[in-house]
Each structure stands twice: as C-alpha cells, then as structure tokens.
Amino acid sequence: MANTLYFHQDPFTICFSEPDNAFESFYSYHPEFMGEVNTTMFTFKNGGIWKHGTSPYCNFYGVQYDANVTLIFNPEVSMSKNFNTLNYEGSTGWALAELYSNSDIAIPIEKAVNANNLAALENQLFTNNFKRKENKYFGTIINNTPATYGEVIYGNSMNGIKGFFSTVKMVFVNPATPTAAELYSVSSNYVMSSY
C-alpha cells in the first residue's frame, strides 16, 4: 500500500516584471483573472471586477489587510553576528512584528510616536518603539530568547540577537489611509558575535 502525502498551501499571486525579466514579489490575494489597462491593474474575483492601486490600500475583494514586508538579513554569510538595531526609511507607522535568527528571537518594536511635549517624550523613553531622527527611524533589538547554558550574557539581558542571518517582518497597521505607506530601505547594525 502506497503512502500518500497531502500538502495544503494557501493560494497566492506571484508578480513578474517584464522589463527586469524577473519575479519580484508575492501577494496574498488570489484573483481568478487579472489584466492591466493604461498602467492600472484590474482583477476578477467571484464575478466582480476590482481596481488595484487606489485608496484604500491593502483592501482586496472587500477585506482590509495590514501591509507587511518580510526581509532576510544575511551579510557576511559565514560569520556569526549580533544584530543590535533595526533602522528604516519610509512613512511613519511601520512596526517590527517579528525578528528572529537561526538561534534567537527578538521582541517586537512598536511604531514611532510623535512626542509633542516633555511628558510624551518621557513616556516613549522606556517603550520599545522606533525613534525618529533626521527623517529615519531607529529601534533597539531586544532579545526575548530563554537563557541557554554557556552564554556570556543570558537571554533577554542582552541587547540584540545573535545568529548567522535574521528574518524581519515589518508591518504597517491599518494602511487604509489616503496616502500610501512607503518603505524605502530597512537595515540592521550588527557586530561580529563573541560566541
């Protein structure tokens, strides 16, 4: 008797760029048919036609989603690193939903809060959110991994996470605003690991 392996994967859409001759992105929506008219994308789903690229953003077939981007940092691939900070350039409102490496997990970083007075500035000093400086956003990566035997500094007492690579998921909650949520670049400050 033969064994049967059942695999279920939610459908998704792959974006192909003809000028670049490359697949560029994955989208979580799944149309029945799609096409473009004068640089405007239209999709068909359940007998309806949907126009994409207009406000509200991230609204697919009547359901509002959060915008998210997943990135992998893998500089100097054979060197173990400590990822200390996460930095981005783009719209105010992006938050770090997940950051993990091959060995550690970080706590989330909340979106930046505009401090208009001294009390607001004091309140944000002890919260783990992005700080704005010179139109860029910086957040401290805080380790949330249980302690393991042999670490020089244990678990969440350590700033940053260690590993060969890290996976980052940035989220823009409620992107149904009249303007698009832009994310130009995401980077991380890292140093060579001491373990």
Image (tube, rainbow, N blue to C red):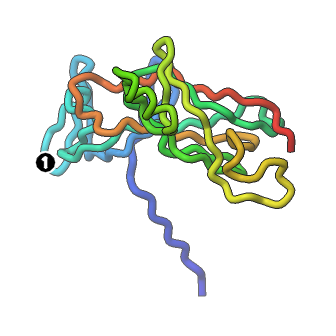
Q: Is residue 138 above or below residue 31?
A: above
Q: How many marks?
A: 1
The residue to which callout 1 is attached is: 47
The quadrant holding residue 39 is top left
Name the quadrant of the C terminus: top right
Residue nearest the observer in this picture, 140 or 8: 140
The residue under the point 38% across, 24% down is 115
Residue, far front = 119
The quadrant holding residue 44 is top left
The residue under the point 20% across, 32% down is 56
Visible in this render: residue 139?
Answer: yes
Name the quadrant of the N terminus: bottom right
Residue nearest the observer in this picture, 95 or 80: 95
Left or right position of 25 against 83: left
Residue type, numbered disc 1: Gly
The residue under the point 58% across, 44% down is 99
Visible in this render: residue 184?
Answer: no
Q: Position of residue 128 (x, y in %)?
A: 51, 38
Residue, far left = 48
The quadrant holding residue 3 is bottom right
Residue, far bottom = 1
Residue nearest the observer in this picture, 147 or 15: 147
Residue, far top = 134
Q: Is residue 123 above or below residue 62?
A: above
Mark 1 element type = loop
The residue under the point 61% across, 38% down is 141
Neighbor class of circle 1 (other Cα within 10 Å; few <14, some 14-19, many 20+) is: few
Residue nearest the observer in this picture, 165 or 99: 99
